[in-house]
Amino acid sequence: IGELALTGEVRSVVNVEKRIKEAAKLGFTTIYTTKYGLEKVKLPENVKVIKVNNIKDLLGKKEK
């Protein structure tokens, strides 16, 4: 969840908590997002959030 810049940076978006909850309702169990804006977010128990800074981080991470 985020905005992808032309430089490959993943930028935060508004209402990230709402977006994560909606994704969980749709059955997503792993969410990739930026590390910014998650300080006060209450995550659903069945959702794993992986924080990335740029697209290279995203492509290098694999779910275990």
Image (tube, rainbow, N blue to C red):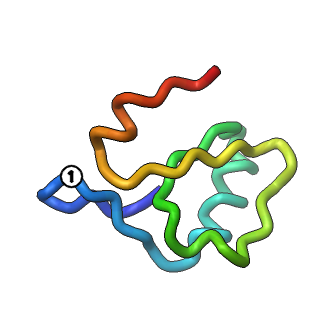
Quadrant of res 3: bottom left
Q: Residue at x 64, y 51 (%)?
A: 23
Image: 14 above or below 9: below
Res. 18 image quadrant? bottom right
Report which residue position mark 1 lands on. Answer: 8
| Residue at horizontal 75 percent and vertical 45 percent from the top | 47
Left or right, residue 34 beside residue 3? right
- Kind of residue sitting beneath label 1: Gly
Q: Position of residue 16 (x, y in %)?
A: 58, 69
Name the spot of residue 7 as percent of width and height, x first: 14, 57
**As rendered, which of 31 and 24 lies closer to the eye?**
31
Decide: is 14 above or below 50.
Answer: below
Using residue 41 as the reference point, say whether residue 15 is left or right of it.
Answer: left
Left or right: 36 in relation to 59: right
User: Looking at the picture, does residue 57 appear above or below residue 44?
Assistant: above
Closer to the camera in the image, 35 or 16: 35
Q: Quadrant of the rendered structure where residue 43 is?
A: bottom right
